Amino acid sequence: MRKIIFGVLAVLFIVTPVVAADGVIDVLSANNVEVTADKMESILNKKGMTIFNRISHSQNAANIGIKLRKTELIIFGNPKVGSPLMECQQSVAIDLPQKALIWEDDKDQVRISYNDPRYLEKRHNINGCEASIAKIEKALAGITKSAATK
């Protein structure tokens, strides 16, 4: 009986799809990857953010003969926002600057994915920085929502 229950649970676990990784927020976009990434870059620039890099993972993969669905990563930040967070818990610096992954899933839907600030708060045991976390949370939600709309 134990083997049957274990077998059923193992099959359910393997077949059940994972919607998003732990600590990652996904936002559906009404645009294609390129338009979404361009809009996000424009919004970040208007907000005075520094864009450190924009990487086309799909193009880099194509350069070595691997076909990926459209996938771009934008690395960005602002010391006025990130530094106070690092002051609360310096280990959070490993997750900064912020990153936004703009990608096409297997159903041709475009998503913007980014690290949930609340997850980073737990991951790094950040205490006494509620205002900074809330500010980052609100900013990321607004930026991604704007980039995802037509």
Image (cartoon, grey):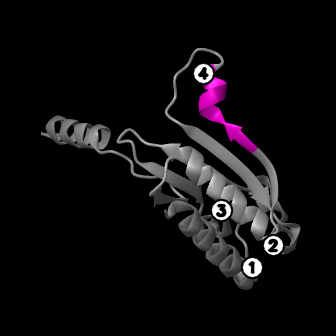
**Residue 53 lies in the magenta-colored region:** no
Q: Residue at x 46, y 49 (%)?
A: 110
Q: Residue at x 73, y 63 (%)?
A: 44
Q: Is residue 127 in sight in this rendering? A: yes
Q: Residues within 10 Å of mark 1 (few under 14, many from 20)?
A: some
Q: Quick one: label 2 or label 1, which is nearer the N terminus?
A: 2
Q: Secondary structure at mark 1?
A: helix
Give the image location of residue 28, x and y in percent: 45, 58
Q: Secondary structure at mark 4?
A: helix
| Outermost left residue | 1
Give the image location of residue 57, x and y in percent: 63, 34
Asked whether disc 2 touches disc 4, contact meaning CB atoms under 8 Å apart, the reply is: no
Task: Give the number of the disc on residue 123.
Answer: 3
Q: What range of the chain is rendered magenta?
A: 54-62
**Residue 55 lies in the magenta-colored region:** yes
Whether 143 is drawn above or below 130: the answer is above
Quarter of the image where one finds residue 91? bottom right
Distance from the alpha carbon under mark 3 to that under mark 1:
16 Å
Asked whether disc 2 touches disc 1, contact meaning CB atoms under 8 Å apart, the reply is: yes
Distance from the alpha carbon under mark 4 to that under mark 3:
34 Å
Task: Give the number of the disc on residue 132.
Answer: 1
Quarter of the image where one finds residue 123? bottom right
In the displayed structure image, the side of residue 132 where residue 86 appears, left or right: right
Distance from the alpha carbon under mark 2 to that under mark 1:
7 Å
Distance from the alpha carbon under mark 2 to that under mark 4:
35 Å
Q: Quick one: label 3 or label 1, which is nearer the N terminus?
A: 3
**Frontmost residue, 42 versus 129:** 42
Whether 111 is drawn above or below 143: the answer is above
In the displayed structure image, the side of residue 8 where residue 41 appears, left or right: right
Question: Identity of the amino acid at label 2?
Answer: Val
